Image: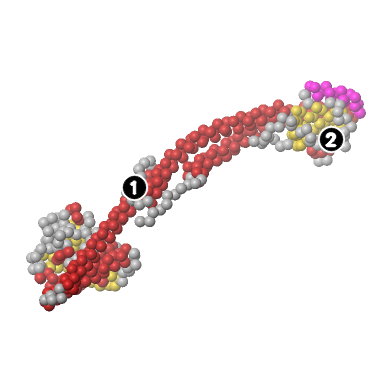
Amino acid sequence: MATISPIRINNPFTSIRWKILLAFLLIVGVSYYAVAASLIALVGDYLFSDRMRQDRINTDRMTVEVEQLLLSAQIPALQAHLEDASRELGGRLMVLDSSGKVQADSYSELNGSRMELPEVASILLDGKTADYGVHKLAPTASQQAPFLSFLQPYDPNVQWVGYCTSALTKSGQIIGVLLFSSPLQDMMQRLFTLQDQMIFYFLIAAAASIVIALIFSSVITRPIASLTRSIQRMGRGDLSVRVPVKGSGELRRLATTFNAMSEKLELLDKSRNQFVSNASHELKTPLATMKILLESIIYQPDMDNDLRTEFLTDVNKEIDRLNLIISDLLTLVSMDAKTMRLNRETFSLAQVITENAHRLAPVAEQRNQEIKLQISDNCEMYADRAKLTQVVYNLMDNAIKYTQEGGTIRLRLIRSGRDAILSVADNGPGIPKADQAHIFDRFYRVDKARGRDTGGTGLGLSIVHQMVLMHGGSVTVDSEEGHGTVFTVELPIHQG
């Protein structure tokens, strides 16, 4: 038997266990990310919405007060008012004219400067009455920023501010913009702290998931690993290996199926070895006999002619026996290889039985045996006539050979529904129970001592069994020691 090299997994990450682990972690990670991102987004939306609502309330209140001062061009009073309101609101207030130039700044730093902010442009250019935006103030530049997203890194050098703008109008015309800048650093730090906590909790959950996944994957892959080791042992020629059947569901069915396959392979291997042994023995016996007879003729040149003729006749019989064994072996090999085909035709099974009974009648008469036929139906068959002829002949020939002189062989043919049932019964010595299970095995003989004296090859019943199966039928044996044997063949009449 050719050996199969054991399978080695060089990369452990290609194993089922690691794939299950990685898949489990991926599911946990994606699910946690979705939940954490949604949670932070909800918290961020709530905090930003609340801050924006408060800033707009303050800005709207200040707008009414600032408009009068701007219209009357009381810039010093406007500046002082902005400084007082800025301390009260905790932010920065600026008033811009219609061109975006700062007229008053509560911090007194950007007076006369032009503010190019999206929130200012949306009022002066797009005609909005109010706007709000969040900006990141880095050391080198200012950038409008979206609300916080999960896993966004925290930079302590970046300041977060909210810009709330409101239109200053006169008779429906925009004459300027009130800009309120409120710091958002505390709020952003709380959100980043929440993010860090979510990451920390994720690491804890990931560690717990790894432990659970390792245990879970070990439970799942342990039977598979055991099955793999068993297959490797089978590859090395040990067909007796079995795996423990544990658990339930697919893994249990897999173990059960493997054990059934292993048992069948072991039986096939034993049958093969036994077959080779029996075939070798069956072929060697006539060859040894012929060698002895031919050596006797060669080394005894003065042998009597009658004795020489007898020896040559025995050699001829052994050659016929070899031809019969080889012919039967080729028949079985052809059936095993599924190359034998059925040549179906319509014929009468009753006629086949009658013809074979007539053919074997002289052999039965020599042994003072009687062949009795009981045919209740012609049983018109659509099957292979030649093969069923061989089936009937082998069963009758077997009954004649293994029935003592003066015995009786009974053949009974009936029709049952769409099946033809043929029984071949004898009143011979019968077959022991222990041997009945192997009666259709190749070269199997119940009586090893007298088997070859009957002239059989030990393959007749095996050929019967295979040919009946080819027709979709079945053959069984029923026997009791001392009370004869009955072979029963059931064949579909219109199969095909």
In the visual, does 477 lie left or right of 88? left
Residue 241's disc number: 1
- Position of residue 179 measured from the top left corner of the image (x, y, whole percent): 81, 31
User: Which residue is under mark 2?
Assistant: 115
- Seen at 11% across and 56% down, the residue is 482
Above or below for 136 versus 244 = above
In what quadrant of the picture does the C terminus appear? bottom left
Residue type at mark 2: give it: Met
- Position of residue 166 measured from the top left corner of the image (x, y, whole percent): 80, 33
Q: Residue furthest bottom?
A: 305
Magenta span includes 326: no
The answer to which of 60 and 356 lies nearer the viewer is: 356
The answer to which of 440 and 6 lies nearer the viewer is: 6
User: Quadrant location of residue 315?
Assistant: bottom left
Marks 1/2 in contact by CB < 8 Å: the verdict is no
- Position of residue 110 measured from the top left corner of the image (x, y, whole percent): 86, 30
In what quadrant of the picture does the N terminus appear? bottom left
User: Quadrant location of residue 428?
Assistant: bottom left
Main SS category, magenta section? helix
Whole-angstrom CA distance, mark 1 to mark 2, is: 85 Å
Reading the chain from its start, which is encountered first: label 1 or label 2? 2
User: Quadrant location of residue 299?
Assistant: bottom left
Is label 1 or label 2 in front?
1
Does residue 444 appear in this view?
yes
The residue segment tinted magenta is 72-89
Magenta span includes 76: yes
Residue 463's disc number: none
- Seen at 14% across and 68% down, the residue is 373
The answer to which of 187 and 334 lies nearer the viewer is: 334
Residue type at mark 1: give it: Val
Does residue 492 appear in this view?
no
